[in-house]
DNA sequence: CAGAATCCATACCGATACTG
DNA sequence: CAGTATCGGTATGGATTCTG
């Protein structure tokens, strides 16, 4: 949330690797599972083009797009309060 | 989220059982773990009164209170789109 | 390129029983 | 009342290797 990864799909359709690279630490397995779940929930569409090399594009549906706003609210909160959160955690670590 | 359980702490301080009863299916273990995590993150304070029978009250901190707004945004989205979500899931179940 | 397959470690949750 | 202790099943994530 703090890195606003959901914006990755906000613009144009994205390919698998366009999502995986900026996410960095996310393995293909997890990315695949996440995209599948979002497809299942009608948040994202998956379009496979019959080419070589293969190309697949993921795009937000209107429903998925409508989720950007509340997500942004959550991210904004996180940006504003992350320091406080970390301070509380390190304090209670003792 | 759909049951807006976070509102349980929005008003006055609440006792353990005041939280557990409305949650219904939540076991004491899970409730304890959740409250501990929220305490650790500075979202909730825990106050134990030295009485018999024991009394413990949980209350939102200002930080915890500030989280109510983005949570409400998420809940609102859920209320508005839950039907769509369920429809997409049952459709992709086939 | 876009993943699938496998293995493993943890995290998390539900149910049950017990206690200061 | 407000938890703790224990057991067990499942879900989830990372690492690695392989494939159409």
Image (spheres, coloured by chain):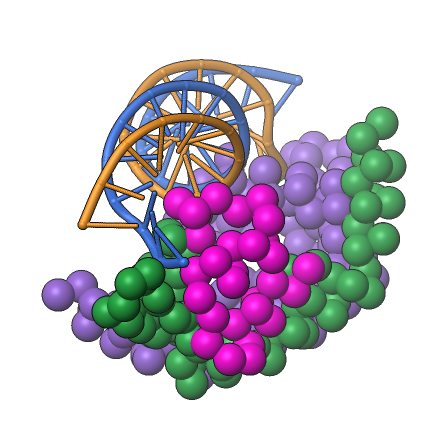
Chain colours: A purple, B green, C orange, D blue
Residue B68 to residue C6: above or below: below
In the image: residue D11, left or right of residue B74: left
Closer-to-camera residue (B46/A81): B46
Q: Is residue A39 visible?
A: yes
**Count of labels shown?**
0
Residue B34 to residue C8: above or below: below
* Residue B8 inside the magenta-drawn segment: yes
Q: Residue at x 79, y 55 (%)?
A: B82
In the image: residue D6, left or right of residue B81: left
Q: Residue at x 40, y 81 (%)?
A: B61
Q: Quadrant of residue A33?
A: top right
Closer-to-camera residue (D15/B68): B68
Position of the C terminus of chain B by quadrant? top right
In magenta, the rendered stretch is: B3-31
Q: Quadrant of residue B11?
A: bottom right
Q: Quadrant of residue A91?
A: bottom left
Residue B74 to residue B32: above or below: below
Closer-to-camera residue (A6/C17): C17
* Residue B26 inside the magenta-drawn segment: yes
Q: Is residue A10 visible?
A: no
Which x, y percent locates residue B1? Answer: 64, 60
In the image: residue C4, left or right of residue A92: right
Which x, y percent locates residue B70? Answer: 59, 76
Which x, y percent locates residue A54? Answer: 68, 35
Residue B88 to residue A91: above or below: above
Which x, y percent locates residue C2? Answer: 63, 37
Q: Residue at x 53, y 68 (%)?
A: A4
From this viewpoint, which residue is outermost toward the left? A94
């Amino acid at each position: 949330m703090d890195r606003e990864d959901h914006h990755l799909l906000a613009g144009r359709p994205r390919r698998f690797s366009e999502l995986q690279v900026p996410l960095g630490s996310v393995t293909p397995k997890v990315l695949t599972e996440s995209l599948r779940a979002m497809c299942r929930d009608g948040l994202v569409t998956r379009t496979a083009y019959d080419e070589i090399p293969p190309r697949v594009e993921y795009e937000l549906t209107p429903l998925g797009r409508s989720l950007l706003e509340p997500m942004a609210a959550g991210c904004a909160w996180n940006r504003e309060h992350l320091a406080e959160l970390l301070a509380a955690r390190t304090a209670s670590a003792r």
